[in-house]
Amino acid sequence: MNQLSDRINNLSTSATLAMAAKTRELKAEGKDIIGLSLGEPDFNIPDFVKQAAIKAINDNYNSYSPVDGYVELKDAIITKFKRDNGLDYSRSQIVVSTGAKQSLFNIASVMLNDGDEVILPCPYWVSYADIVKLNGGVPVEVKTDISNDFKMTADQLEAAITPKTKMLWYSSPCNPSGSVYSKKELRAIADVLQKYPNIYVASDEIYEHINFIGGHHSMAQFEDMYDRTITVNGVSKAFAMTGWRIGYIGAPDWIAKACNKMQGQVTSGANCIAQRAVIAALEANPSEIQYMIDEFKERRQLILGLLDGIEGFKTNEPEGAFYVFPNVSAYFGKTIKGKTINNATDMSMFLLEEALVATVTGEAFGNPDCIRISYAASKEEITEALKRIKEALS
């Protein structure tokens, strides 16, 4: 008899983490799996960041950290927001958490009541919808497609708004599509939101530095949206610090205070050593990590070229992050090697079993026609993986 709560029984498993676990399981069985499912840079973290962590250990940082983060880290975040985004925040507006995922969970916990609607442009990051549902909210999906680079228009936003709409959540650069909203596109969205002063925005900017068009824009940069925007960021992607688990927000004072209160009852302060290391990371000039961005750009060109050679894969050119999000619906209804492919989930499982390449179904991101392929892997792995995919499908 299932004694678990309805809350957990109704919760989806993270598709990206599930595919990563499946990949590890198959590798343990001796299968030569190429993992292109996780959004995890394959670089080592910069040496100066490691040295800051070692110094923190030697300086005996081992006590509970403040719930909302060390003052020195908050100051580094404030400097970073001003330098990179033109945003002015005070210490009371910053909350440091155990990864940007916790930051998002905090936001949902303090902002949503049962039945509140949250608009999610599709595709969206895999955990948005379930975080919203866990906190009593109702995800409202706005469908986009490859023809407009998977970006929601102002008209689509307006059509999705109801009297129950409480928030809009989006990421730019986007996981999984790599789409980047321009300043003009964000301004058009902000213009719609001016008519609805009770709608708040969570702007997920974790991929801001992995941007191939040279311009990142934040919703909070608009004066008339600053008091209604929560800017979410972290160091997992730009500094290859996925396992260090540090994320943060810049938010209106009252929202930041509420997130601090919530976190105080859930995890308290984030890891003390990781926080000290992140001070060094954020104080550094972004040019220190340019070598990673340059490499990702080369890999993007490589994988796009290889995808061009696979019949039935339709791909746009992502402007940021390190994913491609090809439409694979040309294969739906076809049977290959005795396996019928009816949707993106079938395609993802087919590629895992037949090509030994791990990808993620677009269904998990709100788009059942696509699969997500990460190119946060070596060029050799990317080349071999795409060769396998082409052979399995031909």
Image: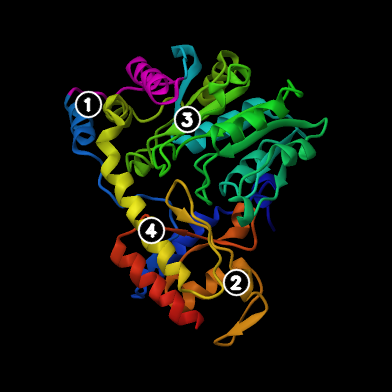
Amino acid of disc 2: Asp
N-terminal-most mark, 2 or 4: 4
- The CA span between labels 3 and 2 is 38 Å
SS for callout 4? helix
Percent position (x, y) of residue 8?
64, 48
Percent position (x, y) of residue 185?
61, 35
The label shown at residue 56 is: 1
N-terminal-most mark, 3 or 2: 3
Q: Mark 2 points at which residue?
A: 346
**Residue in the foreground of this view, choosing between 118 and 324:** 324
Q: In this view, does 192 lie to the left or right of 23?
A: right
Query: Disc 1 vs disc 3: Cβ atoms closer than 8 Å?
Result: no
- The CA span between labels 2 and 4 is 27 Å
The label shown at residue 267 is: 3
N-terminal-most mark, 1 or 3: 1
Q: Magenta stretch: residue 79 in it?
A: yes
Name above or below for residue 394 compared with residue 71. Answer: below
Q: Mark 4 points at which residue?
A: 301
Amino acid of disc 1: Ala
Q: Which quadrant holds residue 171?
A: top right
Name above or below for residue 385 compared with residue 256. Answer: below
Residue at the (25%, 46%) spot, across then down: 44
Q: What stretch is highlighted in magenta?
A: 59-86
| Image quadrant where one finds the N terminus | bottom right
Amino acid of disc 4: Gln
Q: Of the residues tagged 1 and 2, which is closer to the observer?
A: 2
